[in-house]
Image (cartoon, rainbow, N blue to C red):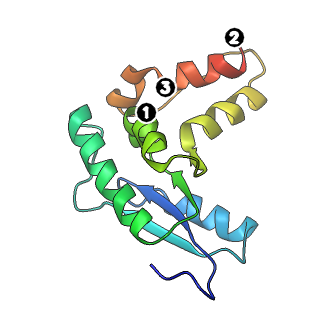
């Protein structure tokens, strides 16, 4: 896409509409940024689908956002971040890719008073151990 005379947007995506919370936070903190949001309400929920299907759907969304010349991506879905986060980062190269699991783990560690953290998530997200890995990466 032609990029002359415009600011490249940030791409935010989710398996449904929950990621709109992330969009609102971005708009409050970065009011001059353009944002493209992709909420896959046609194929929600992702948590009941196979890992291969989640990866396939995620790559389709990433292709869509890359086609809109985004400069960064936010994975606003726990399940997508847990299952396809690594493949998304490989596909996007050096582009910044943020996700809710990394952010959630940091926030939980900053908040806990007893080093015990509870996670509410889909079975797919919990079984991936993505939160456990993110928490232990920051606090072994």
Q: Which is more toward the observer, 40 or 3?
A: 3
Can you give x and y, in whole percent of width and height, for residue 118 in the image?
56, 24
Label 3: element kind:
helix
Q: Is 31 above or below relative to 16? A: below
At 56% from the left edge and 60% from the top edge, which residue is drawn? 21
Locate the C terminus and report the quarter of the image it occupies.
top right
Label 1: element kind:
helix
Q: Decide: marks 3, 1 in contact (CB < 8 A)?
A: yes
Q: CA distance from mark 3 to mark 1?
A: 5 Å
Question: Which of the 4 image quarters holds residue 104?
Answer: top right
At 35% from the left edge and 53% from the top edge, which residue is drawn? 15
What residue did someone put label 3 on? 130
Q: Which is more toward the observer, 9 or 116?
A: 9
Q: Is 7 above or below relative to 27? A: below
Can you give x and y, in whole percent of width and height, for residue 41 in the image?
29, 61
Residue 110 is left or right of residue 33, and the answer is right
Residue 30 is left or right of residue 129, and the answer is right
Can you give x and y, in whole percent of width and height, for residue 24 in the image?
61, 67
Residue 9 is left or right of residue 48, and the answer is right
Question: Which of the 4 image quarters holds residue 88?
Answer: top left
Q: CA distance from mark 2 to mark 1?
A: 19 Å
- Mark nearer the N terminus (3 vs 1): 1
Q: Which is more toward the observer, 28 or 86?
A: 86
What residue did someone put label 1 on? 82
Within 10 Å of disc 3 (Cα), the crowding (few <14, some 14-19, many 20+) is many
Residue 140: give its label.
Answer: 2
Can you give x and y, in whole percent of width and height, for residue 126 in the image?
41, 24
Q: Which is more toward the observer, 18 or 128?
A: 128
- Mark nearer the N terminus (2 vs 1): 1
């Amino acid at each position: 896409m032609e990029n002359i005379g415009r600011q490249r947007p940030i791409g935010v995506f989710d398996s449904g509409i929950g990621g709109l919370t992330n969009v609102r936070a971005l708009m409050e903190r970065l009011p001059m940024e353009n944002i493209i949001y992709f909420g896959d309400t046609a194929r929600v929920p992702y948590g009941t689908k196979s890992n291969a299907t989640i990866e396939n759907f995620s790559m389709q969304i990433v292709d869509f956002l890359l086609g809109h010349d985004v400069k960064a991506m936010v994975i606003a879905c726990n399940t997508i971040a847990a299952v396809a986060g690594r493949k998304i980062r490989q596909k996007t190269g050096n582009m910044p890719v943020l996700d809710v699991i990394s952010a959630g783990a940091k926030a939980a560690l900053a908040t806990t008073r007893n080093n015990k953290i509870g996670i509410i998530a889909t079975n797919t997200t919990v079984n991936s151990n993505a939160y456990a890995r993110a928490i232990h990466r920051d606090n072994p």
